[in-house]
Image: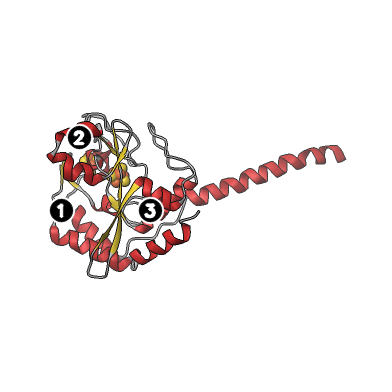
Amino acid sequence: MILPSFQRVPCLFLRKTVQFLMIIHMKQKNRKYEQFPKELTEILEKNHRDSVDSSVCADCSGLCCIQGGPGILENVLFIYEAYERGELVRRDYAFETGLSLPAFVARYFDVCFMPSSSGSLVLFYVKTLTQNGDLVSWHAIDSYGSKNPELIDRLGKSAGCVFLDRKITEWPDGEPGESRNCILHGPESNSCLTEKPVYCTFYSCVAPFEIRKPDVALATAWVDALAESYPDSTQRFNNIMAENIFS
Ligand code: SF4
Ligand code: SF4
C-alpha cells in the first residue's frame, strides 16, 4: 500500500503545480480591464458612429498601422506587463528580451508631453519598424519622410507599427486582400482601457481604407478627457522612471 501512494505523490504535486500555474496564467489572460469612464465612452461612440465594423478591419492590410499610434501611461504599463510575461509575440520580429521599464519605453516609444485643459498629458508614440528591420520614430517618417524621398529610401520604408503581428511589405499601399492584426488588440479594447493605445482605439474608418478625418473639437475633447480621467500622468511617469532607472 505504501508504494502506490508514494508513487502518486509526485504526480499529485505536479498536477497541483500545473493547475496552479494554469490558474495564474488564466488570471493574467482574463485580466479585468476597467471600462472607460463615461465621458471617454461618449466621445468614442461619437467618433465611431457609421464606422466600419471589425469584420472589415479583419480583411484589411492594416494601413492604419503604417505608423504606431499614441497611448497613455496606463497602456504602456499594461504592455510592459505583457512583455514581462512573454506575451508580446509577432510573426516576423523578436522583441528584445530582458529590458527594464525605462529601457523598454526608450526602445519602443517616443515620449511627448501634450498640454490639456487639465495639465500635461504624457503620450507614448509607438515606434515604427522599417523594411530593413530598424525601429524609427513616427515623426521621422511623418514630418520629414513625406517631404524627403531620399530619407525614406535610407530608412528602408515603413513596414508598420512594431506592434503589428507582421510587416506591411508593400509600402505605402499595402497588399490588397492581406490582413494583419494589432497584437495589443483584444475583445475589450473598444470599451475598456487595455494594452491597445487609446488613440488607436479612438481611430476609425468610414469605409475600407477610408480614414475618418479627425474632428478637431472631438480630438481636443478626447485629450482633455484623457488628462482628466487619468490625472497627473507626467508626474507619475517621471516618478516611475526615477524609481526604475537603475533596474
Ligand atoms: S485602415 Fe481602416 S479598415 Fe483598415 S484596419 Fe485600419 S481601421 Fe480597419
Ligand atoms: S498599436 Fe496596434 S492599433 Fe496601434 S498602430 Fe500599432 S498595431 Fe496599429
- Judging depth in this view, the residue of 112 and 161 nearest the camera is 112
Which residue corresponds to mark 2? 152
In contact (CB < 8 Å): disc 1 and disc 2: no
Q: Residue at x 13, y 58 (%)?
A: 216
Answer with the quarter of the image where residue 14 lies.
top right
Q: Secondary structure at mark 1?
A: loop
Residue type at mark 2 is Ile
Residue 86, percent across and down? 48, 42
In contact (CB < 8 Å): disc 1 and disc 3: no
Mark nearer the N terminus (1 vs 3): 3
Location of the N terminus (image quadrant): top right
Q: Determine whether, in the image, residue 243 is placed left or right of residue 160.
A: right
Which residue corresponds to mark 3? 76
Residue type at mark 3 is Val
Find ligand 1 in the image and state its quadrant: top left
Give the mark toward the camera: 1 or 3. 3
